[in-house]
Image (cartoon, rainbow, N blue to C red):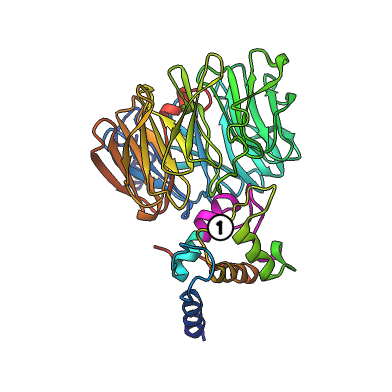
Amino acid sequence: MRRVWLALCFALLTACAQTPPAEVRGTCDLGLIVERASGRVVVVDTTAKRALGAVEGLGDLSHASVVFGRDGRYAYVFGRDGGLTKVDLLTQRIVKRVIQAGNSIGGAISQDGRLVVAQNYEPGGIKVFDAETLELLSEVPAGAKVVGLADLPGQKFAYALFEKGEIWLTDLTDPRHPHTQKFPAGQQPYDGLVTPDGRYYLAGLFGEDGVALLDTWRPELGVRKILENYGKGEEKLPVFKMPHLRGWAVAGEHVYLPAIGRHEVLVVDRRDWREVARIPVKSQPVFVMARPDGRQVWVNFAHPDNGWVQVIDTLSGKVVETLQPGKAILHMEFTPRGGEVWLSARDDHRVIVLDTQRYARLAELPAKSPSGIFFTSRAARTGF
Amino acid sequence: MRVCTKLAMLFILSLPAWSGVGAAELTAPELIRLVRQDCGACHGMTLKGGLGKPLTREALAGQSPEALAVIILHGKQGTAMPPWKSLLSEAQAHWIAERLLAGFPEEPQP
């Protein structure tokens, strides 16, 4: 009898341990919101427009960024304190966490999803990790702060060095033996982006007016400058926050870039890289993000004007809407097909969901000092 | 004692802004939030550095509050440090400089 009891208890325990998740679901409409001050990320469902749960213990998440594995299930969170955390969105648990540097700023994932690369300020350089185990595979010391790390097709990565003024192209075909090409780029690159096709790498320059452009299909041609002298010797306005660049700059034939020290968005034709327009905006732009269909470009601004958001209509090239959605709008993320935009209002401690057609407020989610919002649709995009 | 310090802080901060046209009358918690969150954009929320230098007590050891206040108000040529004089008064810059040298206060949890 006693034996039967024991067997029953054992069976019950194993059954509990193996209980499948309550719900079988896909991940294409999931995302993460970073709560910068509490070391926490919130898992959200963009269809239901609600939080599914939160994952704690991720360290200093000021300026944290996130990339997704190709299955859209695992998120890699890069913290400012050098922490790299692999989070399972479905179970809302930490799978693995390593402290990989003293001061980090972000990362990228390889085309095949097998390599996660961290870009570091201290010590400056990149580090390559196995995406499955987070085992360190190799590193490329740079002797400078690495900005604008972007994945390219063919297991390659492009990035820029703030103090050295260079763009580096690292081939990780053999991840334990990186091969790096170096190009002079210009003074103080602050961030970089790769066009959605994975071909052109652009590094925005802080120390001079202009953007460095590298055709990664023909790297032997070297870097050329575009938008040179866009400030025309005028004194720069103070830049209270560095702008952020990504492939979202591209909308149709045009690339929309934040001007440094000017209250303008610069528009470049991506066929010949010539400046075609300047769009005056409310303040110093930080994120200049095209809606996925390219019909609109949304712009947020540096302190003290970070309560404002403007919408540019790309057909007319004009600002068509000026919004004040909340206090300290730090980040914006579009749902995969662009019908909605999620905005983090840091000082209101909430995330706001807007309809991008009519600008109606569809939902609000509470979050402590929210900053970055990252949806799993990034998993399928080069340069995200 | 703590109450006295807090009162003194509030008194200092409510001094008229003698420089910086438009420098708002920020309260101490607002200034702490500004430093942690907005200066933190470059210097890190923990002030251990980022694109900007670390601003911890150890990192700033040996600097004078006056010199730091000048950097806060006028920026630093050749770096990404902007002048904050349009947003902060001299009194506020001094207050921040002194707090940085003493180890900057944490933000109260919301």
Side of A51 relative to A287 (left or right): left
Q: Is residue B44 magenta?
A: yes
In the displayed structure, would residue A44 be above or below residue A214? below
Side of A280 relative to B98 (left or right): left
Q: Which residue occupies 67% across, 19% down?
A: A173
The answer to whether one can see residue A170 in this image is yes
Residue A230 found in image quarter = top right
Q: Position of residue A57 (x, y in %)?
A: 50, 51
**Residue located beneath label 1 in the image:** B84
In the displayed structure, would residue A215 be above or below residue A375? above
- Element type at marker 1? loop
Q: Nearer the viewer, residue A312 or A74?
A: A312
Q: Which residue occupies 42% across, 38% down?
A: A281
Q: Nearer the viewer, residue A285 or A102?
A: A285
Q: Is residue B53 magenta?
A: yes
Q: Position of residue B67 (x, y in %)?
A: 69, 66
In the displayed structure, would residue A305 be above or below residue A338? below
Q: Chain of mark 1?
A: B
**Chain part drawn in magenta:** B35-58
The amino acid sitting under disc 1 is Trp
